[in-house]
Image (cartoon, helix red, strand yellow):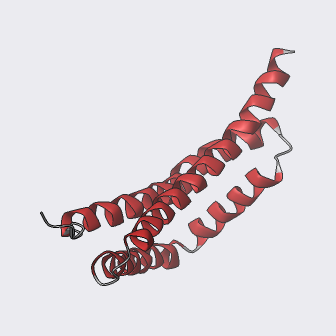
């Protein structure tokens, strides 16, 4: 019986890199689509927004103003992420590093999504409490 670990496959690499790119693209999409909708609601009621929400609103405003930089930057970052993922999974002989990289490229955008949606949800909760009084 062979004791060598199985080789990384191109399909596995493409899946990992593709999932990470998809998560980042969805976050960018949320900045372009969800933030203006939430901002309109927050502005209508004159809500004092938490710092985290304001930070995401500022990022969304910058992205809206400079989409011509943000979209090519996302494409370049996606290509770099794919190349680094391929290199780590196929050229570096460390399964630990490969696993660590996979965890990092998936957990970072998931964490960003969680913070983003929490920052949009929190003012809505405060608004509901104020309207229910």
Residue at 24% x, 67% y: name it: 5
**Eyeballing the image, is 51 above or below 81?**
above
Q: Quadrant of residue 95?
A: bottom left
Q: Position of residue 13 (x, y in %)?
A: 28, 67
Q: Residue 58 at x, y = what percent?
A: 71, 63
Identify the residue shown where x is 69% and y is 56%: 57
Q: Is residue 118 above or below residue 88?
A: above
Q: Position of residue 110 (x, y in %)?
A: 53, 53
The residue shown at (74%, 41%) is 42
- Looking at the figure, which quarter contains the N terminus? bottom left
**Residue 125: x %, y % from top left:** 75, 29
Q: Nearer the viewer, residue 114 or 75?
A: 114
- Front residue (pair 72, 92): 92
Q: Quadrant of residue 62?
A: bottom right
Is 28 left or right of 52, judged from the image as shown?
left
Q: Residue furthest front?
A: 1
Left or right relative to 50: residue 96: left
Q: How many marks?
A: 0
111 or 102: nearer the eye? 102
88 lies left or right of 57: left
Q: Is residue 15 left or right of residue 81?
A: left
């Amino acid at each position: 019986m062979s004791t060598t670990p199985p080789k990384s496959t191109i399909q596995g690499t493409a899946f990992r890199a593709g999932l990470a790119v998809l998560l980042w693209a969805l976050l960018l999409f949320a900045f372009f689509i969800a933030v203006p909708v939430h901002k309109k609601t927050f502005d209508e009621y004159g809500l004092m927004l938490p710092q985290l929400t304001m930070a995401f609103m500022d990022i969304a405003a910058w992205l809206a103003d400079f989409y011509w930089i943000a979209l090519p930057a996302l494409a370049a970052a996606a290509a770099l992420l794919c190349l680094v993922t391929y290199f780590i999974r196929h050229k570096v002989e460390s399964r630990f590093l490969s696993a660590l990289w996979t965890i990092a490229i998936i957990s970072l955008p998931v964490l960003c999504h969680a913070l983003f949606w929490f920052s949009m949800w929190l003012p809505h909760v405060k608004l509901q409490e104020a309207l229910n009084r």
